[in-house]
Image (spheres, helix red, strand yellow):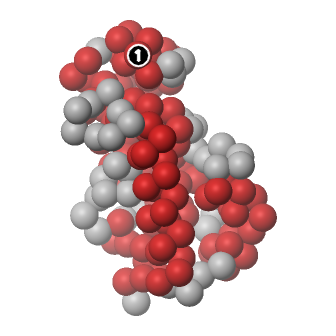
């Protein structure tokens, strides 16, 4: 469900963590095909093809969740997104992290306010942004 795509996210770079998300999504897309995945998930076929072929760092978390939800192994899109947000927020609580600390320690060019908005779903979050935020939270909790 994205947050569990890697066994030890703290040990991975943001790029490696994003690749783990993409591999998880790719498994679902490969099982149903690019055209079917795009149509059934309501995701642009070009984005689906990009993740099927390799990297899709600009794919939005909501689109990734819609693609994962095509598999019977995952819940629906909304549940995936909500569980991901809960996981990140719980990690912040455990690590005693605030959004400004995250913003100053990840290479995203986002303010603390923008990170908060992304975590709350008020602005879109890409897989690249998720990987940086998720990885930093996991690293802090591994200390």
Figure disc tally? 1
Q: Nearer the viewer, residue 38 or 50?
A: 38
Q: Nearer the viewer, residue 32 or 136?
A: 32
Q: Nearer the viewer, residue 108 or 4?
A: 4
46 on left or right of 54: right
Q: Position of residue 130 (x, y in %)?
A: 53, 54
SS at mark 1 in the image: helix
Q: Dot 1, crowdedness within 10 Å: few (<14), some or many (≥20)?
A: some
121 on left or right of 11: right
- Residue at x 47% of width, y 74% of height: 91
Locate residue 138: give its quadrant. bottom left
Q: Nearer the viewer, residue 50 or 71?
A: 71
69 on left or right of 114: left
Q: Position of residue 134 (x, y in %)?
A: 48, 64
Q: Position of residue 90 (x, y in %)?
A: 48, 73
Q: Which residue is mark 1?
A: 40
- Residue at x 55% of width, y 64% of height: 133
In the image, residue 62 above or below residue 136? above
Locate residue 32: give its quadrant. top left
- Does residue 18 show up? yes
Q: Quadrant of the C terminus?
A: bottom left
In the image, residue 13 above or below residue 81? below
In the image, residue 136 above or below residue 116? below
- Residue at x 53% of width, y 38% of height: 62
- Does residue 23 show up? no
């Amino acid at each position: 469900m994205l947050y569990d795509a890697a066994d030890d996210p703290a040990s991975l770079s943001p790029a490696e963590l994003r690749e783990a998300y993409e591999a998880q999504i790719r498994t679902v897309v490969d099982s149903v095909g690019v055209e079917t995945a795009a149509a059934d998930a309501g995701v642009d076929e070009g984005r689906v093809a990009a993740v099927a072929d390799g990297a899709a760092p600009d794919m939005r978390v909501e689109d990734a969740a819609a693609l994962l939800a095509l598999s019977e192994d995952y819940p629906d899109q909304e549940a995936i997104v909500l569980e991901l947000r809960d996981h990140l927020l719980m990690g912040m609580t455990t690590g005693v992290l605030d959004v400004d600390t995250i913003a100053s320690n990840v290479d995203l060019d986002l303010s603390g306010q923008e990170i908060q908005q992304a975590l709350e779903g008020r602005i879109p979050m890409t897989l690249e942004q998720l990987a940086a935020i998720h990885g930093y939270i996991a690293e802090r909790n591994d200390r």
